[in-house]
Image (cartoon, grey):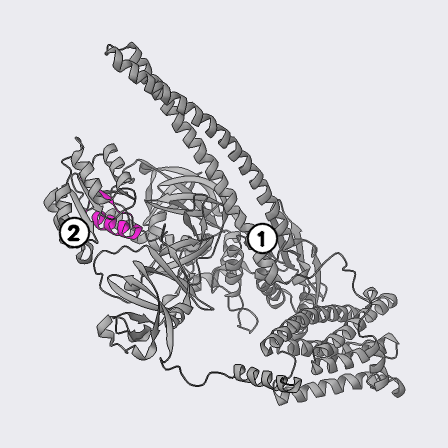
Amino acid sequence: MPTAENKKRTLKERARALAREPKGEAPAGEEIEVLEFQLAYERYGIESSYVREVYPLKELTPVPCVAPFVLGIINVRGQIVSVIDLKKFFDLPEKGLTDLNKVVIIHNHAMEFGILADAILGMRRIALRNVQPSLPTLTGIREQYLRGVTPERVVLLDAGKLLTDESIVVREEVES
Amino acid sequence: MAKKDDDFLKELLATFKAEAEEHLKAITSGLLEIEKTPAAERQTQIVEAVFREAHSLKGAARAVNMTEIEAVCQSLEGIFAALKQEAIAPSPELCDLLHPAVDALGQLLSSGGGPSAASEESQLKHLIQRLEEASRGLVPRDEEPATGGRSLQIAQDEHPTPALRPPMADTIRIPTAKLGPLLLQAEELLTSKLAAVQRAAELGQVNAALAAWKRESARIKGRISGGRVRRSEVETLRELVERNERAAASVEAKLASMKKLADLDQRTLGRLVDDLLAEMKRLSMFPFSSILEIFPRFVRDLSREQGKEVELSIQGGEIEIDRRILEEVKDPLIHLVRNCIDHGIEKPEERRRKGKPSRGRVGITVSQKDGNKVEALIADDGAGIDVAKVRSAASRLGTVSQEEAEKLSDREALALIFQSGVSTSPIITDLSGRGLGLAIVREKAEKLSGTVSMESQPDAGTAFRLVLPVTLATFRGILVRVNEHFFILPLASVERTLKVKRDSIRTAENRETIQLNGHVVPLARLGDALELPRKRATGDSADAAPALVLGLAEKRIAFMVDEILNEQDVLVKSLGKQLSRVRNIAGATVLGSGRVVPVVNVPDLMKSAVRLSAATVREAAAPGEKEPAEKKSVLVVEDSITARALVKNILEAAGYQVAAAVDGIDGFTQLRGGEFDLVVSDVDMPRMNGFDLTARIRADKKLSAVPVVLVTALESREDRERGIDVGANAYIVKSSFDQSNLLEVIRRLV
């Protein structure tokens, strides 16, 4: 029979053990969870922590006087969200005809917009050590927006960079 | 745990800050009143009030451990205590010491409580020392306020009794952060109200369609009974028709009752939404005085600095207006008042020379105008504005030419002062005179759907009239169509709508214009101003087009559209974080049907139209491009809206007349109802796919010869063969799609 004192000590030890931060990396290395989607016959991944939701594209209202990469605005349960075409933003060649009918809404504390996608392929955990830094020439996407390419040829986009990129924000007035 | 504490502390500090700001405002206004040396009795009341404010602030500061604020309050309290006991008398010198002390408190408050640098810390020490000297110098030593005895007494008094608080029992303090979302939610109900209207209208349409069906079926019945057809067939047909009628009657009865209920729902919901919204808006209404409080102090400091004597009078501070408008209008008001003192009020000696009292007057008068408008009149009795100077400043800047400037009436010339860059001030001070201020005031006013105007008489004074809406949230808008795009124009800017006859358009000074009530009004196309591509030869050939005359300040431009649909309540939403500011577009709204429609920014649009006018006329003067003799018409059947729009654009650009359908059934219906030379269809679609559609077309007598191009994601040989089996003329795989091969295929087929 353990004494009250013993019990207390054991419990304290356990609590300390549980409170300890796990040391080092798990053998599998650091993993990230990504949302994988298809756009113009390529597979892209975007870190799920930046994804607010995926919304079906039912109606799209074009907005005049904006850059061509801004396709328009949609109504997400009463909130207006702008939708951009990554192909145009990245200056990728127009390839084929695509069925853009999903919007991946990405956000951080200060920015939010939707990215058009052909289809959502699902969520996937990706070990970062398997991600190879890719040459921009391989994907056609400027290096700054790229985290790399997985062995399965999924192009990992850097959503953090996209969201903080000033060139994606439209801020224009009419000069008098 | 630590995070929770942090959050709690943050919240506590925020509460303290809000409370402290109120105390500071009260102390400042008290001081200003003391300065005016009112009657002894009133003086005692004010000193008492200010003393309590300082005391409460001290207690609050101690509670959140802001020792510096507490220390300054302590010495302030000492002075007020001395004043209270009439141990010292109020004097201008004393006030000059007290105001900076209050300012220092404000700074400490905004910097988060503590002095950030050593130099500031020493300044603070110096300030406290001076305050204590002020009370000590005139107060007997044994009554020195900063001794332990007094502090002790105060410590017992930590929680002031309710009686000491201002009478605010019927108000509660709600953080705007909580009120804001609530208001937004209430406003959101407007969408439901609009949707209810839409539903009721749709039910009405179904009803009408049903009635038409019934009539048709009765007509057929009549023909059958009178015709020479074999008896047995007639019997069968009659039975069918009768069954048809019974079904129609029962559906109709049901629909009619549903329509009644929907109407009722719509009215109930409409009233509830309007009432709730009105109440919510009242919640966010604040008296004007909440932003006027700063002005006595502001005017005092500014006029002293410039060696002028100014008396400020404020009227109508109790009038309430949406807090969001108040916040926006604060800076413009400051600017206008500053303008009065800087440019308007003369130095005392000059005023005496002009035979005016040496003390100038600046008045802020707020008054309720008709309906939803409030007017703020900012007037001075100073030098007035020299119209000649405005004319020369404007022509010097090239805003108007010399001759134009001479031609303008005095009133029109004065309006030039709101143009960017026009200033009559010969020198540029750090206050005003750069000529930007009034342009900004006008822009702010217009952004709030308000106006600003000015009247001035030399040597009699200047008055700025700022007219503002009382509430901001919803406004009425006019829904218009240009090509297939819809836009909302704010009703407040629309002066009138009219039909513009093509042959009434004149070109004057390189601009298209129309005559309106004897005035020449410039004419523009809304689509051009919004940079939409012009459709070839559609609508333009009609001999009259609807137009709206938009007015802004003194300017007036007529905009042609394809259609004016209706007028309705509009809830303007932002375009999202990524579209921070879009040229010509102020926001978007959601219609009852769920459609998202951009709301036009009128000030931008007017500028765009002016920029455009020269260019468009040049273009219009050139003879039109070659029009295809006869347009081939193509039906695009595709369920993905982006692919549909893309194919449609490609075909239209190539000169085809294009209609679109969302799936096979829709496509087939349109084909039966219209004349088409070719069909481009997707394969994988809901309801009826492309293979089935093709088969139906081939089986239909009227349509069997229409060429069909299938565009598909299915690449397999089987699919291709199936496409050929059902009778498609061409099969394009999406992954290898490009516009040249589509156009090439189509050219070969039609």
Residue B284 x/y as whole percent: 63, 55
Q: Which residues are magenta?
A: B631-656
Between the C-alphas of marks 2 and 1, the distance is: 59 Å
Indicate whether A129 appears above or below B426: below
Does residue B634 appear in the picture of this structure?
A: no
Query: Within the image, what quadrant is residue B296 found in?
Result: bottom right
- In the image, is A150 to the left or to the right of B597? left
Q: Nearer the viewer, residue A30 or B114?
A: A30
Residue flagged by tag 1: what amino acid is it?
Leu
Q: Label 1: which residue?
A: B468
Q: Is residue B406 left or right of residue A42?
A: right
Mark in the foreground, 2 or 1 = 2
Q: Are marks 2 and 1 on the same chain?
A: yes
Left/right of residue B711 with respect to residue B5 in the rendered view:
left
Quadrant (top left/top right/bottom left/bottom right) for the N terminus of chain B: bottom right
Q: Earlier in the sequence, mark 2 or mark 1?
A: 1
How crowded pointer 2 is (Cα within 10 Å; few <14, some 14-19, many 20+) is rated as many
The residue positioned 63% from the left and 73% from the top of the image is: B8
Q: Tag 1, which chain?
A: B
Residue B704 visible, this orientation: yes
Disc 2 residue type? Ile
* Chain for numbered disc 2: B
Question: Does the magenta segment cover residue B446?
Answer: no
In the rendered image, residue B452, in percent from the top left (x then y), is placed at: 55, 55
- Numbered disc 2: secondary structure: strand
Q: Which residue is mark 2?
A: B732
Q: Quadrant of the C terminus of chain B?
A: top left
* Residue B727, position as x, y percentages in the image: 13, 41
Q: Position of residue B458 (x, y in %)?
A: 60, 59
